[in-house]
Amino acid sequence: MAYKKEKMQLNGEQRKILDGKEGKILQEAMESLIKYGTAMGAREFIRISSAHTLFTLRSKVARCFLPRGVLLTKEDIDKFSKEIIGTQVRVKTTVNPGAIDREKWQQMGAEEATYNSVMQTVEIGKRCGFMMTYTCIPYLTDNIPLIGQHVAWSESSAYLYINSFLGARSNRDSCEISLYSSLLGIAPNFGLHLDENRRGTDLINVQCELKGPIDWGALGYFTGDRVGIGIPVFKNLRRPTTEEAVQLSASMSSSGAVPMLHIVGVTPEAPTIETAFRGNTPRQTYIFDESAKGEVYQLLNYKPEGKVDIVFLGCPHATLYEIKEIARMLEGKHVANDIRLWVMTSSSIRASAEQLGYAEIIEDSGGELFADGCFLCYYVNAPNKKPKMDRIATNSAKQAFGARRSFNSNVFFGDTERCIQIAIDGGA
Ligand code: F3S
């Protein structure tokens, strides 16, 4: 069915797709992108060089391929694969964490049916050309866009990072939209794809020292909460480490809908404060000082005293360096019997951690190094599978916020060293 209220200009190839000449799936994808672009005021599409999306049997495009909730035989998958021939991604596309660790799904409490369904998704995704990387930090491993490249990424922490620290250009696309973009290789041209929408709107004056990723997470939480929808420009902020930049991006996108940020001298488009604002007058100036930082810690530490059931690290997925540090802190020590220490990363990073011996140290100490999943996403969708987590400890502001909101957990929010100490001491 042709989309009637088309306002966007299409080239010949795009019109052919819209007319269904390249199959129903691409036609539906084109219709959806046109609706989205029209609603957002875009007049045309631009070519993208990569996408990052969610590909699960629950996602809409996957449902185009597969009947919902049905476990398929190999023959079924072969049959569906034939039907989707021609439906290949047109750009490099990575995927966000899937439900579970494909090796340690039982430790996560998953059932065999869930495992089978994930494996089917992997099979279908691979045949369509998706790189089934299952990570929320693809920008550090498998999908690293360059400055000025237009891309279509979902995952709020990831698209914020690539806009701000790599200078790539992506809107905060939903999983479905980024999936359609990956199949068509285009995105509606609006929002952060355009220079004028990348200008700073609010000034954040940092007047305290930031010690490690945890403080950067607190700064991100503060900023997202204050700015809401806008683009903060940070003043008096030193150059972050990669892990600090990851925590800043992730926490900001959980407390607000900030699409990108400027750190003067760090963000490629912000060599000076003037270029960061490019003519805009700041709507507001916010001061982040010791007192503001303390307030964030107080807020994220929700009833932190008492016995911790589980220590969650790796939100966003732990980098190899973080895993190395966790291994260093755990070497020769033991996680207490009645507490879990769970670390999440991607398969590619876990493979390196295994090769380098870090994984063995973590597991010898009683911790678990999981890959490809997301504790928050999985247990939100499978609450009856979640381990006891009345009180958790985490080094991630995003996880602290999410666990309290989604699981009603009491939360200790502190740096990696303190979280590990809690795991060793028995959670008290
Ligand atoms: Fe990644 Fe899940 Fe945290 S997708 S950012 S580990 S909530």
Image (cartoon, rainbow, N blue to C red):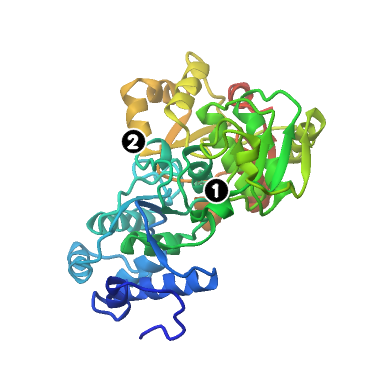
Report, in whole angstroms, how far the alpha carbon at label 2 lies from the one at label 1: 21 Å
Instruction: Find residue 348 and name its label.
Output: 2
Residue at x 64% of width, y 32% of height: 216
Query: Which residue is tagged 1?
Result: 376
The image position of residue 147, as x and y in percent, is 43, 41
Q: Is mark 1 within 8 Å of ligand 1?
A: yes
256 or 103, nearer to the observer: 256
Image x and y of residue 234, in percent = 67, 36
Instruction: Check disc 2 and give the amino acid type.
Output: Ser
User: In front of the other: label 2 or label 1?
Assistant: 2
Q: Answer left or right for 279 relative to 158.
A: right
| Left or right of 70, for residue 74 | left
In the rendered image, residue 392, in percent from the top left (x then y), is placed at 63, 38
Relative vertical location of residue 7 with respect to residue 108 in this rendering, above or below:
below
Classify mark 2 as within 8 Å of ligand 1 or not, answering yes or no.
no
Question: In the figure, 340 relative to 50: above or below?
Answer: above
The image quadrant where one finds the C terminus is top right
Indicate the amino acid at tag 1: Leu
